[in-house]
Image (cartoon, rainbow, N blue to C red):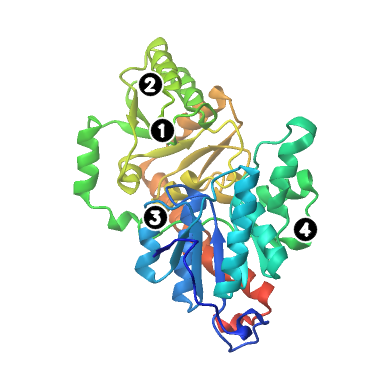
Amino acid sequence: MSTDPTTSIDAPSPQARQPLPDGQRPPVVLQVLPALVTGGVERGAVDMAIALAEAGWTAIVASEGGPMTRELSRVGAEHITLPLASKNPLVIRKNADRLAELVTQRGVDILHARSRAPAWSALMAAEATGCRFLTTFHGTYNTGGWFGLKNRYNAVMTKGERVIAISEFIAEHARRVYGLDPDRIRVVHRGIDLGRFDPARVSPERIIQLAQKWRLPDGHRVIMLPGRLTRWKGQSVLIEALALLGRHDVRCLLVGSDQGRTGYREELEQLVRRRDLVDVVHLTGECNDMPAAYMLTDAVVSASTDPEAFGRVAVEAQAMGRPVIVTAHGATGETVLPGRTGWLTPPGDPEALAQALDRFLALSAEERGGMAQVAIEHVRANFSKETMCAKTLEVYREVLGLAAADA
C-alpha cells in the first residue's frame, strides 16, 4: 500500500528500538530508492522486499512510486511515497526528517539505501535515530566535477555499516576510488528470475509471434544485442563487426528503445546503409517478451564500450542456453565462462568481435548444445534472485547480530 508521509502512524512499543535478540519481534527493513519504474536497482529492491516478507520480516520500501509498487502490495510489503528522486539539498534534508520520523514510528532496524540522493537522506536519518545504515553500490557513477564534488556526492554509497557491491568489479572500484575498507564490503551479485528466464517455459507460439513481428526469414542464424539505444552500449561496434564478417546469411537484431535518442538511432540506421547491411541489421525497438527473444536468437552480444557493473543481459542469455559474446571489462569476467559459455573481446574492437562471431557461426549443433547446457547450469548455480536475496539476508542478520539459523 502507499502511505502519505504526513499521515499519523501509530508508534510502536518502546521496546521496538531496542537491540533484537534471537526470537524477538521480526526485524523491520526500510529500503529507499528514487522510484519503482524499471531497471536493475528497482528490480533488486522489489525482489528483496518480497524475500523479506516471505521470511517473516517487515518490509517497507520508500520511493516516488511507480508501476512496480503493485508487486509489493501483493506480498504484504508496504510502499511509502516520498520525493526521493530529488537532488535538491532542501528536499534531501526534508526527506531525512521524514525518514527519521518513519524509523521511529515503525521501529525500523535497518535503513538500506540503493541510490545516492536517497542515501544522503537515509544517512542523516540513521544518524539521528541510531538505526543501522546499509548501502548497495550499484555502479561506477560519474566522477570529477568542480573540486571533486561528484566524488563527494557519490561517496555516500560507501558510508554504510556494510556496503553491498553487485560485483567484484564494483567492490574493487569502491576500494580504489573511494578508499572503502574491504572489511565493510560484501559482494552480492545480482540475480535473475529463473522462473521467467527458463527455456522450458517459453512456448513455441511466443517465439513464432516475435519472428513474424520482426519478419525473420527461416534458415538464418540470428544474433541479438539487447540494450537501450545509447552510444556506450556498442551497437555501432557490432555493425562494424558484421561489415567485416561480410556474411548476409545472418540476421542481427538491435533490441531496445531509443528513449528519445532519435539522433543516435538515425546514426545507426545511416551506418547500416553505408555498410550495406540493410538486409542483415534490424532495429526492433523495445521488446516486452525478452525470454522469447532470447529463444529466437542463436547468440547474444554485449558490446558495451564502458564497463558493465554487472551485465544482466549476459546472465539472462546464458540462462536461456544462448552463447554470449561480451566485452572483456567490468563484471563480465565474473558472469561468463570463456570458451565454455561464450567469448570475451576487447571493448570497441570490431575486428575481434567479427572473429568471435565467426567462431560462433562455425560451431556444430552438438557444440552449441553443449555450451547451452553449461551456460544454464552456470547461471542456476550462481545468479538466481533466490541466491541474491539469501546473501542479502545474511548481511542483514550480520548487522543485527542475528544467527543464520533464524532464516
Distance, label 3 to label 1, CA atoms, is: 39 Å
Name the element at disc 1: helix
Res. 68 mark? 3
Camera-nearest label, 3 or 2: 3
- 262 vs 173, left or right, is left
From the top left corner, tell me how far across and down residue 119 is, in percent. 64, 54
Instruction: Name the residue beneath numbered marker 1.
Output: 361
Distance, label 3 to label 4, CA atoms, is: 33 Å
Report the residue at 37% width, 66% height from top.
73
Instruction: Name the residue beneath numbered marker 2.
Output: 247
Sequence-first tag of 2 and 4: 4
Sequence-first tag of 3 and 1: 3
Name the element at disc 3: loop
Is residue 162 among what the camera can see? yes
Confirm or deny contact between disc 3 and disc 1 (CB under 8 A).
no
Sequence-first tag of 1 and 2: 2
- On screen, 403 above or below 210? below
